[in-house]
């Protein structure tokens, strides 16, 4: 523990840019978990039903 | 550095998702089960073809219809952990990249403090603000025919939450007054105006069936909000601790 009040240097934004490619991938994952009804996953209502209780309890609209 | 933050976000997200899943399993599932029991006992249901609680394709779905259902109730209960875990991975990764961009620019200069402050802000923006307009509903509440419209409105509310926080933070940084309380006041007003406007202007959704027990609705909503609260509290704390550990290893 070399100190709790470490002041941090900002990460240059150009170094962050390529990592932002992960964002659409993660958003797609969130969409499949929370909202897909077969339109993208092509699994019919399977994903919806599998994630059903999670959707309700995470507060996402569900049927 | 960015890679470390991203990996930390993904793993801590998974862990916090499983913790929230455990909370939801013990404190939320009983209410889900009660709602499904009511739904199945209702005279208007799948059998009569009423728009009671049908997923649109007709035929074989439902919540607890044994061998008829696409996914049985026990599997749905296990799927809860899958859902909260994957939710944690997804939002944890996005959070980590946002954190990488904000770190050293906005908020506390101490990494653990920033982690906790950012997690609390994320909870307010993407959970609390949407929840107050479009609260979580148990099974049997909500018209299947409006699912797309309701989902869209919910997403709009999440965007409003995130945008309002960004506007509030930007205003606090731009404002030229020196007093901290005045800066906070300006930031707070700039944050609240779009939020309140969205609450007032977006359409209301009121699809609670007549006779649905108010206490069950309340208990479910508290459990749902609690699930998200547990997730973001666990996530913020674990993300902060993981950062301190990473630093201790380096030095």
Image: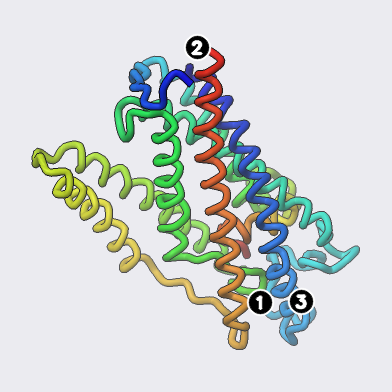
Secondary element at image label 3: helix
B128 up-or-down from B58: above or below: above
**Which mark lies nearer to you, 2 or 3?**
2
Residue indicated by mark 1: B51
The answer to which image quadrant residue B88 occupies is top right
Secondary element at image label 1: loop
Question: How was this image coloured?
Answer: rainbow
Whole-Å distance between the Cαs marked 1 and 3?
17 Å
What residue do we see at 57% from left, 27% from top? Answer: B8
The x and y percentages for residue A9 are: 34, 18
Number of marks in the rendered image: 3
Whole-Å distance between the Cαs marked 2 and 3?
57 Å
The answer to which image quadrant residue A30 occupies is top right
What residue do we see at 68% from left, 70% from top? Answer: B31
**Which mark lies nearer to you, 2 or 1?**
2
Work out whether mark 1 precedes mark 3 in sequence or the reverse, and give the earlier one: 3
Disc 2 with disc 3 on a shared chain: yes
Work out whether mark 2 precedes mark 3 in sequence or the reverse, and give the earlier one: 3
Residue indicated by mark 3: B37
Position of residue B82 in the picture relative to residue A61 (left or right): right
Secondary element at image label 2: loop
| Residue B182 can be seen in this image | yes
Residue indicated by mark 2: B251
> Dot 2: within a 10 Å radius of its alpha carbon, few (fewer than 14), some, or many (20 or more) residues?
few
Position of residue B178 in the picture relative to residue B143 (left or right): left
Between B102 and A29, the residue placed more toward the observer is B102
Query: Label 3 is found on which chain of the structure?
Result: B
């Amino acid at each position: 523990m070399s100190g709790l009040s470490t002041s941090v240097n900002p990460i240059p934004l150009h170094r962050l840019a390529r990592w932002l490619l992960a964002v659409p991938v993660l958003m797609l994952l969130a969409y499949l978990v929370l909202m897909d009804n077969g339109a993208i996953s092509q699994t019919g209502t399977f994903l919806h039903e599998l994630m059903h209780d999670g959707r309700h309890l995470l507060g996402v609209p569900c049927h | 550095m960015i890679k470390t933050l991203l990996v930390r976000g993904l793993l801590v997200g998974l862990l916090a998702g499983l913790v929230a899943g455990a909370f939801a399993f013990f404190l939320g599932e009983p209410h889900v089960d009660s709602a499904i029991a009511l739904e199945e006992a209702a005279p208007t249901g799948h059998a009569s073809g009423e728009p009671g609680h049908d997923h649109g394709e007709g035929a074989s779905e439902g919540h607890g219809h044994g061998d008829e259902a696409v996914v049985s109730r026990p599997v749905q209960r296990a799927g809860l952990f899958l859902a909260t875990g994957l939710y944690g991975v997804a939002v944890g990764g996005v959070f980590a990249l946002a954190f990488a961009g904000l770190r050293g620019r906005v908020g506390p200069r101490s990494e653990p403090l920033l982690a906790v402050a950012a997690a609390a802000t994320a909870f307010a923006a993407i959970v609390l603000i949407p929840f107050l307009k479009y609260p979580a509903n148990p099974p049997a509440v909500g018209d299947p025919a409006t699912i797309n419209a309701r989902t869209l409105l919910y997403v709009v509310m999440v965007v409003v939450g995130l945008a309002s926080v960004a506007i509030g933070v930007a205003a606090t940084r731009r404002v030229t007054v020196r007093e901290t309380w005045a800066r906070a006041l300006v930031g707070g007003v700039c944050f609240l105006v779009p939020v309140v406007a969205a609450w007032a202007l977006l359409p209301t959704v009121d699809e609670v069936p007549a006779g649905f027990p108010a206490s069950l609705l309340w208990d479910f909503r508290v459990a749902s909000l609690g699930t998200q609260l547990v997730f973001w509290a666990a996530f913020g704390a674990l993300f902060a601790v993981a950062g301190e550990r990473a630093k201790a290893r380096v030095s």
